[in-house]
Each structure stands twice: as C-alpha cells, then as structure tokens.
Image (cartoon, helix red, strand yellow):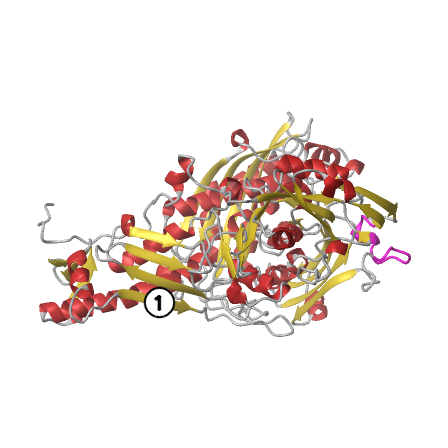
C-alpha cells in the first residue's frame, strides 16, 4: 500500500524488539565503568581485613605503613572518633577496633599514590589477635553456652518475623493428607561482572561527591548525609554505568564509609575498587535458610493450610538478608489459595558472611519448599500435579488472606501454557514409567510456579518516581528520570513509553538517569518496580507535554485540540493521519515567539500500594506477577550429574513492552536459577570462605545453558504502563524447585537441599544421605 507523503501511517513501539540504548557503547568498549574513572589528584585506597573469624584485637601497629613513601593516610577505628555503626540494624562498625566477628572484617585502611603502594602498606600493618570460640552453624546459635556475637544481643537473634491468617489447627483438622519436610538452602553470591567500588571527593566548601555503584542513589544520599551529619543538599551521587547489581548494591557498606573518611582526611579524591577475590569475600550473599514446611490438603485437592518455621543465618552483621521473610511470607500465604497460614522466622547471628538482598529476595528459598510439597501432596492423594495446581491457583479479582489484591492475574494461563508447550503431563508419566528401565541416564520433568511483586513494594515512605521531560527547538527529547539503569534496560523501556505517547522515533531521546543533582527522586532499583513505577511517571510527563503541544498547534491551526494527534514527528489530523505541521517547526515557533514558552514538564507517580500493618497485612504492591516454569533434566545415576536440557517458561508480564529486553530478562533469570539449582555453592567452612574465585565457584557457562522456550501472558494490568508489570526477579525464582521435581520424576528420589551437585545427587540416589560432610559449615 502506498502512503501519501502528507499522511503518517499508524505505528507503535510497544512489543517491538528494540536494542538497549547503551548497547553500542558497551559493544565498542567505550562505556566508562568505575574502574575507568580517574579524578585529578586521586588517591587509591585498600582495606586490611581480619582474616580471623572471631577474635579480640589486642593491638594494631600502623607506624610502618604510615612511614611508607607515597602513603597519605592510614586509619583504624581509633583514628575516626565520629565513626558510627551502619546497616539495617545499625550493628556494623565500618572499622573494627576491639573485636572481629568474621573473616571479612575491616581493620585498617590506606590511601596512597597508587594501588601497589597501598597494597604494600597493608602488609606493613601488624595486628595481634586473641582468638575466640567460633559460632559457624545457625542451629547452634541459640543453644546454651553459645558465644554471643554481639554483647547487646545475648540470644544471638537479629530479627524475628511472625505472621498468620486463618486458623492452622482448623486447617489441619480438615486435611486428609498432612506433610512435613525440612529443606536446606545454601550460600550463593551475586558474581556481578563489575566489582564493587566508589570514588569520594570533598570540594572546597565541604560538599561530598560520590561516584557510586549503588542501586538506591537517593536513599544512599540521605544515609550518608545523616551519617556525616551534613545537610543532604551537600551530598551528590553520580552513578557510573554499573556492571550488574542483582540486589548486591542495595545497602550501605563499610568500604563506602571508609572511602569517604579517607577523602575527608586527605582532602583528595579517593578511589576504592575491589579485586575479584575481595568481591567474593566482602560482598553480601544470598542467605542460607533452614526451612520446615508443614502443609495439608483434602482428597479433592483443596489446599487447607501451611505452617512454616525458618531459621536464617544472618552472619556477623545485619544487612537486607535478614528482612527477606517480608517477601517469603507473601509466598507462603498467597502462592495458591491458602485458607490458613502460620509463619515464624528468626534470623540469628553467626561468625559467617552477612547476607544481603539478592534477586528474588527470599522467594527462591520459599518457592523451593512450597513447589516440592505441591508435587508431594498431589502424589499423596493420587492427583495429577498440573491439575492439583490448577485447582488451587487464583483468578483475577481475588484478595489473599494477607490482603494482596490480584487486580490482574494470569496464573492459570501460565500453568496451562507451560504445561501445553512442554507436553508436561505426557512426559511426566513416561519418565515415571522409565525409572526402572535399563541404562544410567534417566529423564525427568518438573513444574514450579511463582508469585512476586510486579509493581514495587511499599516499604519506604514513598515508592514513587519523578520525571522531568524537555523538548528542544529541534524536537530532541531529554528524559530525566530518577530511575537508575543497572543493566536491566530500564532507560530503553522508558524511552519507548515516552516516544509512544509523543509519536517520536526512539532515536530522538536522550535519557539522563545518573546524577542526584539533576534527576528527581526515586526510591531505587529493587522489588521489580522500575518499569511499572518509573514507566508510569514517564508516561505522565509525556502526556502533559503532548497536551501542551497540541494546545499550541490547535491555536495555530484554529481547530480543537481533540482533532489532533502526534505521529512520526508531526502534529497530524487524528481522523485521517494527515501531517499538518512538523514538530521541530512548531516548537521553534513556541520558543522564539513574543511570549516564549518551553515544552518542559514534570510528573511524579506514586503507586496505589499501601504499607502493611503490624501483622504484615495489606496490599503492598501495585501489581503482582506470576510465572510457571517447566524444567527437563537428564540424570546420570552412575555419577549423579544432572544436565538441564530444556526450560519452558510462561510469564504473566501484563504486557510486553520491549520484546528483546524482556526475553533477555527471562533468559538471564533462568540461567541464574540454573546456577542456584545445580552448580553455585559458596563454601563457608567454620566461618572461612573456601572458594572466593571463579575457578572454584562454578558459574553456569554458555555450553551448559538449556534450550529456553519463552511464552508471555499479557494480562493487561490496569494500573501498569501500557498494561505492563515488572518482571526483573521472577525468572530466577522457579528453576530450583522445578529442577527438584524433575529429578524426582527421573529417579524417584526426593532431594531437600541445594545445590544438586553430582556428589549430593549420587549420595541421595545411593542411600548415603544428601550432603557430603565437607559441604557442611
């Protein structure tokens, strides 16, 4: 069909496969990460860590280090009298002066002319320790005589969470089948390709500038201002491009405080960047959990109750890992229709590494237990596992016992789509029948689903995001957003949403999102919130700009603004698509008229979610996302090796915005879940990390990645931007649980602990117990 040059045909950016806006710079090696940034007069910092798991510090001698040429500062806890504890529970001193509680503890720090000099200076520092008893197993933390990790917490309890709805005793009485199992979840770490680092600098007026990889720049700004007792207006954070976050950069950490203090002392910019080994040793982990789940159902397949007790290894200090029960309880209470639920957890101090936020935020651990018991309950009553799940899956409009309102819900469509495309029921029966057949290679298939927040979570006073939008004289658009880009592709999606409203090609957009002195407030990257919340904010600013432009065009064309639209860089007649005036010309006429007017708008979006009450009840997210993943495996019963051959993933994403980007999110999440299930294991033995490197910490590599068949359920969430929901965390959550079910389908052996290493699987298959002794802490 030939289109008149004066007619602009309808088109859309929504659902297209659009390359990330930052991809060309990264592909050509032009992206400047924290490693690549150097300021004039910059010093380099290094930290001396204890290397002791639990000990008293008897003395620290830094005189030789201070005397080394090229050293500008050496600090210990005794040199910084105003240093205060940091972290979620304010129990973590950045520099330790009297006692160390883990091998990663920071004892002293050096700022020098070069990294090499700083490292040499560390070797000159002499520390005398007196070792103390080590508490390395969370199960021992509350036993009589257990050493107290913190004197003000003699019971070693960092946090407790208690939640209930309904009456569990009634639910158990109504049950025809009751199961109880204990599951052991292990340490893994984030393995961001970009290690932790920052640069701190004070200007002549005492204002602080930080080049920081934080995921929460505005919260970081506020925390540092409070910590240093400064006016927040005097703290500025610039985010360089970030080489991965996954939750690891959510908290305030000792190295950041140390870097700031060195910059203040030396009056020079100070740069502190981890080595790869240091990234393993000093970064937060995914929290180990000992999880006991008791649940029941009726003969007809109706779930009756869940009762849960979890023990979390908090490590030596409290970071965000201790708060993951906030999300876990949502899964226990509301993944499937659960009329009665009771959940109690305790996070306890040990001398192990402290746990932080990690993609899925406790949901991988919770789902691992729930979805195994879903299979086990179905088997106990003789019901098909898929049908059992369908019977208990929720529909749109339901409100759970915890108060979560599922205004959109594609749960059943996820289940049926994943089952259909994987031929789940047929394969399940075939594999079950082949368990006793000759040959060591057994095939299995397993299913698991997830519920996760898809529109943020109302944790802080505001879960909102601001946007500033500016159009220049040539219709080039600058989108200034509070939302951070940490590799997830948010700036591309935001540009799409704005261009869709304004009828502009995405090439016309520049996104500014990396400087707290310029961008408006946003709470940060977490809780799968950015597309949903920043997207709504961007659309709001774009609609205000569009209204302003069309009003000006209507006045010029002497027509009603409702008759006009914007498309292809023109103001058009809405009914016919006829191009009436090109946008750059209209904007110049606005800007350079006698009564000049700029097209510059702002919008702030606060989601309709609510803070939960003291009983943890309330509609905490503006939307909820669902997924079902089916995993197919091959198990070699002679060696215990498990090979993941295929994953079928069906995700309720509300609406697909950038198909290329969302496929990448699903694929990346699947591979992260695969590592959690099969290969990744941060070995911590008696408080000592045994494999702080990529040689011994086994990440999944390209040849091991399974075929991934992705399907999107578009439930068109009414509150979401163009109907979309957040999807960043969900793809990683189901894989381990589905893998456990697949191994059982292949072998008839149920394994309750992770990871499914050859050693663990072999021992389970041959009746030797699941876990070899060397894996225990």
**Magenta span dominant secondary structure:** loop
In front here: 346 or 520?
Answer: 520
Tag 1 residue: 602
Let me know if residue 13 appears in the view.
no
The verdict on residue 141 being magenta is: yes
In front here: 62 or 2? 62
Return the residue nearer the eye: 346 or 633: 346
Left or right: 319 with respect to 474?
Answer: right
Q: Is residue 248 above or below residue 573?
A: above
Dot 1: within a 10 Å radius of its alpha carbon, few (fewer than 14), some, or many (20 or more) residues?
some
Question: Relative to 378, is 354 on the left or the right?
Answer: right
Q: Is residue 671 magenta?
A: no
Query: Residue 492 location in percent, x, y?
Result: 37, 50
Q: Looking at the rendering, in which quadrant would you find the C terminus?
A: top right
- Say left or right for 41 vs 471: right
Magenta stretch bounds:
135-148
Give the answer, above or below, for where 654 lies relative to 749: below
Residue at 55% from the left image edge and 68% from the top image edge: 231
Q: Image quadrant of residue 472?
A: bottom left
Instruction: Give how far across and how far down residue 426 sits, in percent.
Output: 51, 40
Please give the name of the residue rendered at 67% of the width and 32% of the height, measured from the top-left corner: 696
Query: Which quadrant would residue 688 be assigned to in this image?
Result: top right
Q: Residue furthest top?
A: 439
- Point out residue 516 in the picture as x, y percentages from the top left corner: 47, 59
Q: Residue furthest right?
A: 145
Say what secondary structure mark 1 lies in: strand
Name which quarter of the figure residue 722 lies in: bottom left
Looking at the rendered image, the quarter that the N terminus falls into is top left
Q: How many marks?
A: 1
Is residue 335 at all visible to an observer of this figure?
A: yes
In terms of depth relative to the viewer, which is nearer, 329 or 558?
A: 558
Give the residue displayed 59% in from the left and 69% down from the top: 402
């Amino acid at each position: 069909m030939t289109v008149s040059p004066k007619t602009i045909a309808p088109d859309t950016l929504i659902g297209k496969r659009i390359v990330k806006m930052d991809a060309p710079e990264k592909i050509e090696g032009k992206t400047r990460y924290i490693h690549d940034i150097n300021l004039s007069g910059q010093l380099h910092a290094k930290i001396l860590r204890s290397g002791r798991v639990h000990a008293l510090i008897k003395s620290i001698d830094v005189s030789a280090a201070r005397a080394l040429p090229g050293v500008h500062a050496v600090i210990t806890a005794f040199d910084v009298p105003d240093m205060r504890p940091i972290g979620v529970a304010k129990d973590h001193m950045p520099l330790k002066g009297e006692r160390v509680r883990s091998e990663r503890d920071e004892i002293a720090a050096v700022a020098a002319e070069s990294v090499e000099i700083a490292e040499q200076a560390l070797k000159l520092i002499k520390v005398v320790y007196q070792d103390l008893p080590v508490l390395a197993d969370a199960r021992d933390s509350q036993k009589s005589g257990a050493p107290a990790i913190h004197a003000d917490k003699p019971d070693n309890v960092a946090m407790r969470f208690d939640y209930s709805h309904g009456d569990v005793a009634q639910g158990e009485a109504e049950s025809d089948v009751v199961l109880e199992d204990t599951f052991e979840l292990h340490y893994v770490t984030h393995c961001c390709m970009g290690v932790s680092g920052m640069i701190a600098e004070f200007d002549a007026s005492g204002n602080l500038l930080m080049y920081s990889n934080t995921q929460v720049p505005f919260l970081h700004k506020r925390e540092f201002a409070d910590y240093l007792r400064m006016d927040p207006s005097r703290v500025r954070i610039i985010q360089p491009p970030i080489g991965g976050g996954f939750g690891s950069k959510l908290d305030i950490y000792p190295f950041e405080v140390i870097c700031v203090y060195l910059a203040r002392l030396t009056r020079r910019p100070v740069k502190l960047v981890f080595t790869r080994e240091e990234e393993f040793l000093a970064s937060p982990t995914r929290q180990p959990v000992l999880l006991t789940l008791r649940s029941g159902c009726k003969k007809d397949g109706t779930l009756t109750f869940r009762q849960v007790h979890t023990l979390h290894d908090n490590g030596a200090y409290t970071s965000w890992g201790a708060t993951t029960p906030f999300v876990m309880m949502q899964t226990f209470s509301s993944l499937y229709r659960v009329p009665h639920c009771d959940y109690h957890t305790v996070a306890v101090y040990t001398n192990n590494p402290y746990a932080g936020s990690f993609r899925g935020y406790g949901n991988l651990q919770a789902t691992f237990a729930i979805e195994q018991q879903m299979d086990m309950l179905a088997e106990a009553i003789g019901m098909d596992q898929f049908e059992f799940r369908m019977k208990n899956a929720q529909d749109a409009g339901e409100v759970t016992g915890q108060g979560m309102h599922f205004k959109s819900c594609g749960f059943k469509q996820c289940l049926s789509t994943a089952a259909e495309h994987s031929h789940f029921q047929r394969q399940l029966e075939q594999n079950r029948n082949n368990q006793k057949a000759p040959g060591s290679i057994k095939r299995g298939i397993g299913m698991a689903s997830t519920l996760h927040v898809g529109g943020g979570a109302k944790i802080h006073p505001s879960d909102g995001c601001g946007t500033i939008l500016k159009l220049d004289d040539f219709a080039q658009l600058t989108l200034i957003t509070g939302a951070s880009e940490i590799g997830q592709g948010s700036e591309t999606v935001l540009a799409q949403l704005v261009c869709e409203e304004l009828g502009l090609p995405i090439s016309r957009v520049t996104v500014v999102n990396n400087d707290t002195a310029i961008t408006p407030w946003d709470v940060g990257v977490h809780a799968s919130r950015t597309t949903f919340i920043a997207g709504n904010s961007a659309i709001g600013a774009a609609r205000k700009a569009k209204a302003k432009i069309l009003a000006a065009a209507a006045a010029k064309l002497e027509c009603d603004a409702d008759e006009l639209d914007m498309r292809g860089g023109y103001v058009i007649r809405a009914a016919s698509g006829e191009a009436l005036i090109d946008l750059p010309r209209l904007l110049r006429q606005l800007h350079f008229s006698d009564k000049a007017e700029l097209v510059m708008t702002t919008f702030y979006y606060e989601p309709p979610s609510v803070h939960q009450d003291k009983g943890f009840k309330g509609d905490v997210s503006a939307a909820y996302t669902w997924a079902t993943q089916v995993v197919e495996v091959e198990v070699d019963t002679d060696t215990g090796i498990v090979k993941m051959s295929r994953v079928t993933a069906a995700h309720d994403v509300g609406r697909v915005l950038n198909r290329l980007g969302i496929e990448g999110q699903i694929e990346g999440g699947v591979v992260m879940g695969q590592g959690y299930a099969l290969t990744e294991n941060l070995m911590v033995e008696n408080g000592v990390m045994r494999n702080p490197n990529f040689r011994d910490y086994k990440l999944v590599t390209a040849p091991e990645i399974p075929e991934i068949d992705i399907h999107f359920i578009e439930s068109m969430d009414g509150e979401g931007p163009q109907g979309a929901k957040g999807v960043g965390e969900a793809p990683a959550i189901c894989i381990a649980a589905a893998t456990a079910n697949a191994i059982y389908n292949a072998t008839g052996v149920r394994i309750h602990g992770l990871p499914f290493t050859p050693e663990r699987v072999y021992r389970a298959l041959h009746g030797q117990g699941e876990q070899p002794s060397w894996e225990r802490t």
